[in-house]
Image (cartoon, rainbow, N blue to C red):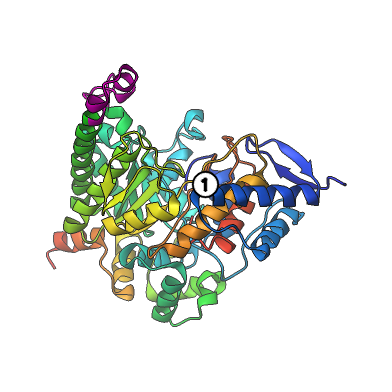
Amino acid sequence: MGTGDIFGMPTAHIMASAMGGIRTAGDLVAWMQMSRRMKINEAKAYVAEKLGIDVIDLTNEEVMRQVREDLDIGIITSVAGSAKGIAAKWNIAELLDIQINSVNLFKEKLRL
Amino acid sequence: MEKNIYTRMGDGERVAMSPEEIREDLLAGTNDAADRANIPVLTPDDLEHLFDIFAEPSKVVSVRPGEEVIVTDDAVATLFYLDQENCGQGLPLSRVQSILAYERACCADTLSTGHVDYTFKQVKPIVNFEKQEYYNTSLMTTAPFFYGSQPNMGSYFRPDGPYPNPADLFPVGKIREALDAQEEAAAQLTRDLVYVSKQMYEVGCEGINFDTAASAGDADFFATLTAVSELKKKTRHMAIEVGMSSEFVMGMHGEMTFDGKLLAGMYPHQQVKVVEAAGADIFGPAINVSVGESTPWNLARAVTFVKECVAVANIPVHPNVGMGVCGVPMFEVPPIDAVTRTSKALVLIGKADGL
């Protein structure tokens, strides 16, 4: 991205063009770019298929809030007892059928 | 001609321009990029689309639902607590608090962290501290989490580093010595990039960002590409992003090659191919901004470079969009009207996979 004050640069780009991170499905699509070098449309299609939703709904808060809670992959509002952090990433790795290095290390520590 | 469209100069100054002046600058900007890199100019439809983005009277513009892309960054969360020199806000927050705020309040698609000096050479002696920070934070983050730093080969030359400075050697005619110094520095830089990255991989690092690559020229770029190539053999589950320092690889050495291609003089559509060949997963082109030209000129130029880069790329392309790059004015508080127009244009016309 680059630099500039936090509101004027990154937040402005996020509002104008980004997917919305764990608020919607931005993190999931990003994992596919990182792990399989997928271009944006391919990554979106892959994630939408795994979630069983239309591509247009990947950034639809009204759909994704419930999808994320149902799949226990981390939600933007804090709910005690729901998967967060490494637990959410574990579920994401299984959902997307990808390897996440931090999750692999965590599993190793659990001796599973 | 009524000057009824508000826009910005490359230094952020607000100016009013007529529609004709905007169109002239868009055309001049795309022609400049095309001439320099020998790439196609934007199509008439592209230019009209770009004009519409500037003519839109709203302060903030955006893509439509379904057109969004991914944002990756270079330790942007540190802006919460850094100072004015880094465009930071100076909040009394820790690194982990800043990163979690960036994930859960700003809703970024990916996150990253890095040492405040943001240079691999400076990270090497304190890598254990960085590992602790990364490891602790990665247990709490859900979005993909990068560790970033700059190759910054300039820091390997005297007086900051151990190698003779080419800037001292070239002027006195010591050409061979200047080339040798760069080759030796590049070899050490590669070792440091690999060492730090492997250390981070051992604590579960999900992605490494070689940010501002080639800042010291073609030898700096060569060292980065070589490190990527080596890391990809041993760190399979860690993504690698390579972000550039400028639109053009300076030939400070002049003879460095990678994958059979001369690195000096490469523009983004050529840079991405060697980055791909090295094995990187995401590429971030950086297009320079001229502070004396308008944002329409600068953005048309940036979109021209990015569009060709994306067209030839087989990996995701995330153009750098901080202050002073890819059309964003060179000002530490980037005007939101210019930032969002840059964002929209690079995604919709440049076809970027992310920012």
Q: Quadrant of residue A100?
A: bottom left
Q: Position of residue B18 (x, y in %)?
A: 81, 47
Residue B2 part of the magenta segment: no
Which residue appears at 49% of the width and 41% of the height?
A3
Which sits in the foreground, A11 or A3?
A3
Residue topped by disc 1? B36
Residue B173 part of the magenta segment: yes
**Amino acid found under the numbered disc labelled 1:** Arg
Residue furthest right in the image: B1
Q: Position of residue B214 (x, y in %)?
A: 36, 40
Highlighted magenta segment, given as a residue range: B157-179
Which residue appears at 30% of the width and 25% of the height?
B166
Residue furthest top in the image: B172
SS under mark 1 = helix
Q: In the drawing, does residue B24 fall left or right of residue B321?
A: right
Q: Position of residue B202 (x, y in %)?
A: 18, 51
